Amino acid sequence: MSDIIDIYTDAIHDNLRPMYANWQPGLPIQLGDYGLLDGNHFVHIGNVATLGIKFKVRKDTSKDQINFSSKGTTKVTLNAAGSAPVAGGANVKASLQIDFSSEEAVFFNAAECAYDMIEDKAALGTEVIQRFKSNTWDREWAVITDIVNAGSTTIAVSGGTTSSVVFQASGKVPQINLADASISFSVVSSSNVALQIAAQQGLSPLIGLSKIQHTFLFFGSKFKPALLMNNLGLLSRLEDTTDTNAAPLPANPIYFGQFNA
């Protein structure tokens, strides 16, 4: 079995591109934080504000639900109050039951999500590229330019080929509504579950990243980074080509934008 960090962060990015997971989900983060990507795991280094880079924030006024589970390996059952047995055999409160049939399956639910983002990413990119050209910025650094703040977050990650967890509502509700952040619940039974978070409030589980990237050009039968082609002396060759289908050369071989690799 892979490490939990890889299972979870890979599943988040695969299902919710271009967003990445905030690991751990309760880690305090801010817009403008920068760091490195280790696989799909963002490793914090600092904040651009300490480097003298300023930006404005745009806040989302709407609330949305973000939800996914690993296809084919995860069964999600919402049991109404009094309809399903829980630990001890009592038919009591409403519950959420998740059954996994794979050791690397993930269930994720974020209720009442609000989206915050850096207002002018182009202006931020101009600052970052200027620092890169003056050798005060590492080209591999990524910046958190988007954050999803959730009213409540529920996560379960399978720890075996057969595993399950049951979350029970804390209050008297007829059924758990995963889109309602006011409904709290707790774990009442769990088997072979590697990670479980039950309707935890105030988390920022998802982030969007921007970084310096290559401009790609079509060369032959493949796309090649313009910066690499320039280093190989290939851009000058393309400038002399008479091929009318050749891609126009970019003004700059690099750009700063949303990262989705």
Image (spheres, grey):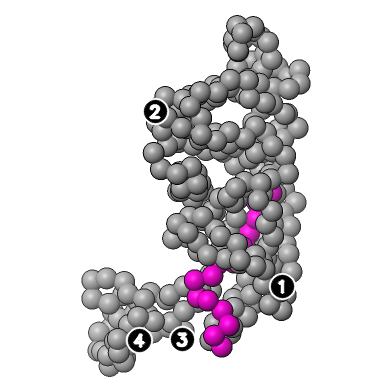
Residue hosting label 4 = 230
Image: magenta residue range: 134-149
Please report the residue visible at 35 percent of the width from the left and 86 percent of the height from the top.
Answer: 230
Q: Give the Cα distance between marks 2 and 1.
A: 45 Å
Question: Do the CB atoms of the residues marked 2 and 1 lie less than 8 Å apart?
Answer: no
**Measured Cα–Cα span from mark 4 to mark 3:** 12 Å
Disc marking residue 161: 2
Sequence-earlier tag: 2 or 1: 1
The residue pinned by badge 1 equals 49
In front: label 3 or label 1: 1
What is the distance, in whole Å, between disc 2 and disc 3 at their CAs? 52 Å
Res. 71 visible in picture: no
Q: Earlier in the sequence, mark 4 or mark 3?
A: 4
Tell me the kind of residue under disc 3.
Answer: Ala
State the residue in front, 251 or 138: 138
User: Which label was assigned to residue 152?
Assistant: none
Image-quadrant location for residue 35: bottom right
Q: Residues within 10 Å of mark 3 (few under 14, many from 20)?
A: few
Q: Are marks 2 and 3 in contact (CB under 8 Å)?
A: no
Which residue does the image show at 60% across and 6% down from the upper left? 89
Q: Secondary structure beneath disc 2?
A: loop
Q: Relative to residue 202, is residue 229 depicted above or below? A: below
* Residue occupied by mark 3: 251
Q: Quadrant of the N terminus?
A: top left
